[in-house]
């Protein structure tokens, strides 16, 4: 999402049971303190994990921005900056080397949210501004990945789990939340995280 045009000088699982083939056969839950940190990936040197870490730091800062800072002016950023500079549409068009009608259409397209990114960048430059563009995750990327891994792990081999429950087989090992995530990392590789078909998870 584009943040705007700015002047250039400005509940978790407690225990889960697995067999030796990563087949989850039972789960129970515990309350986790709100300030409890989610375990990070054990593959800290992996480039993807490092990228998530860096983006999480950036995303945290962006999410903490006040709502008014991220709000788009009613008439759009181009018109707001142009009018604040006391610049007419004709003068703005001249700086962009386009017609006045095209400049007016450009402002209208920004208001509708249909303006192209490269066009918005040129408009920003014409106003002596920098275009700030970002996708701000609604929550941490690592949290998304950890949650997704666990979801996939719990859905793997559902028929096998049901069969084992029907046979009243009792699990012998309980995993803590940390162990649960480690098991999920072992059984669910990154390439399987976002596949639409659960049967593809884990490369099985």
Image (cartoon, grey):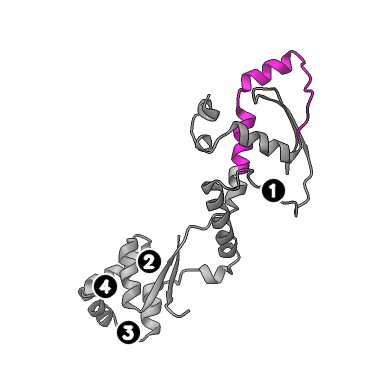
Magenta extent: 146-175
Q: Secondary structure at mark 1?
A: loop
Nearest to N terminus: mark 2 or mark 4? 4
**Image location of residue 52, percent across then percent down:** 55, 51
Q: Position of residue 178 (x, y in %)?
A: 72, 41
Among numbered discs 1 and 4, the one appearing first in the sequence: 1
Quarter of the image for residue 182 reads top right
Query: Which residue is identified by label 1?
Result: 38
Foreground tag (1 vs 2): 1
Q: Of the numbered discs in the image, which one, if any, rests on residue 103? A: 4
Q: CA distance from mark 2 to mark 4?
A: 13 Å
Of label 3 and label 4, which has the lower sequence position? 3
Q: Nearer the viewer, mark 1 or mark 4?
A: 1
Left or right: 76 as drawn, with respect to 52: left
Q: Which mark is residue 111?
A: 2
- Circle 2 residues within 10 Å: few <14, some 14–19, many ≥20: some
Element class at badge 2: helix
**Residue located beneath label 3 in the image:** 87
Between disc 3 and disc 2, the foreground one is: 3
The answer to if 162 sits in the magenta stretch is yes
Q: What distance separates the C-alpha of mark 1 from that of mark 4?
A: 49 Å
Query: For the residues marked 1 and 2, what is the alpha-carbon distance in whole angstroms?
Result: 40 Å
């Amino acid at each position: 999402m584009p943040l705007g045009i700015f002047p250039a000088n400005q509940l978790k699982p407690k225990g889960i049971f697995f067999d030796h083939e990563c087949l989850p056969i039972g789960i129970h839950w515990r309350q986790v303190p709100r300030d409890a940190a989610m375990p990070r990936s054990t593959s800290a040197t992996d480039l993807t994990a490092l990228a998530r870490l860096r983006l999480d730091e950036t995303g945290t800062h962006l999410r903490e921005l006040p709502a008014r800072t991220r709000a788009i002016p009613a008439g759009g950023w181009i018109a707001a900056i142009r009018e604040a500079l006391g610049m007419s549409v004709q003068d703005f068009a001249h700086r962009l080397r386009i017609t006045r009608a095209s400049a007016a259409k450009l402002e209208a397209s920004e208001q509708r949210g249909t303006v192209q990114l490269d066009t918005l960048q040129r408009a920003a430059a014409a106003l002596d501004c920098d275009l700030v563009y970002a996708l701000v995750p609604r929550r941490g990327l690592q949290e998304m990945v950890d949650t997704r891994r666990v979801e996939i792990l719990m859905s793997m081999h559902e028929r096998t789990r049901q069969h084992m429950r029907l046979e009243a087989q009792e699990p012998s090992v309980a995993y803590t939340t940390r162990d649960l995530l480690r098991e999920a990392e072992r059984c669910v590789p990154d390439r399987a995280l976002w596949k639409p078909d659960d049967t593809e998870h884990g490369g099985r």
